Image: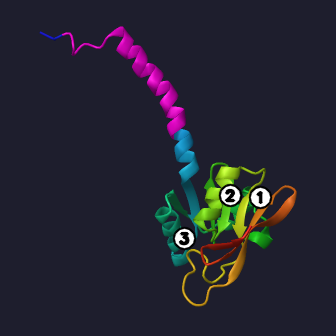
Amino acid sequence: MLNNHARPTRRSILLAIAYGAFSAPLAAAADDATHIKVTKRPRCDCCDAWVQHLRDNGFTATLVETSSLEALKQHLRVPKTLSSCHTGEIAGYVIEGHVPASAIKRLLAQRPAAIGLSVPGMPAGSPGMEGGEPQVYDVLLFGETGQRVFGRYKAEQLLEN
């Protein structure tokens, strides 16, 4: 014999349905703002180090390896002049190259009209390219109307924005 406390009531069923309907989109939105899909070439150690930098800074990442990275970059509208060794996709933005996690967080907080951020090339000292003397490098915001400096960095340190 079941006791009354074990049976779901009409009210508890409706509350469970309502909770599920409202909490699923919120959870998906939260995941969207912290989850990045990173596409890279096989056996690229600096890409793996950059992904670890993101994970160390609160992001989750899915890695996809491909030998045809240029096709993805073209599809995502990454200009050749801004290209690097890996491409990330997060919350509707493209993250190209060794962009610091703090710049990505700022992008997601500000939500500018743009395609994304890029650190062209592979500057020494940028996240994933540690070792040796760090260079000063620019993180560029790019979109349909061109590009601009989103921040100037040395290693992971923002020097100016």
- What residue sits right under mark 3 in the picture? 50
Q: Residue at x 77, y 54 (%)?
A: 114
x and y percentages locating residue 63 in the rendered image: 51, 61
The answer to whether one can see residue 84 in this image is: no
Q: Are marks 2 and 1 in contact (CB under 8 Å)?
A: yes
- In the rendered image, residue 21 lying in the magenta stretch gets the answer yes
Cα separation, mark 3 vs mark 2, equals: 15 Å
Name which residue type carries label 3. Trp
Q: Is residue 92 above or below residue 17?
A: below
Q: Residue furthest bottom?
A: 132
Q: Secondary structure at mark 2?
A: strand
- What residue sits right under mark 2 in the picture? 94
Q: Nearer the viewer, residue 126 or 42?
A: 126
Q: Residue furthest front?
A: 160
x and y percentages locating residue 142 in the rendered image: 79, 61
Q: Quadrant of residue 70?
A: bottom right
Q: Residue at x 56, y 56 (%)?
A: 36
Mark 3 or 2, nearer chain start:
3
x and y percentages locating residue 134 in the rendered image: 62, 85
The way the protein has been coloured in the rendering is rainbow
Q: Is residue 146 above or below residue 30?
A: below
- What residue sits right under mark 1 in the picture? 77
x and y percentages locating residue 123 in the rendered image: 66, 81
Magenta span covers which residues? 4-27
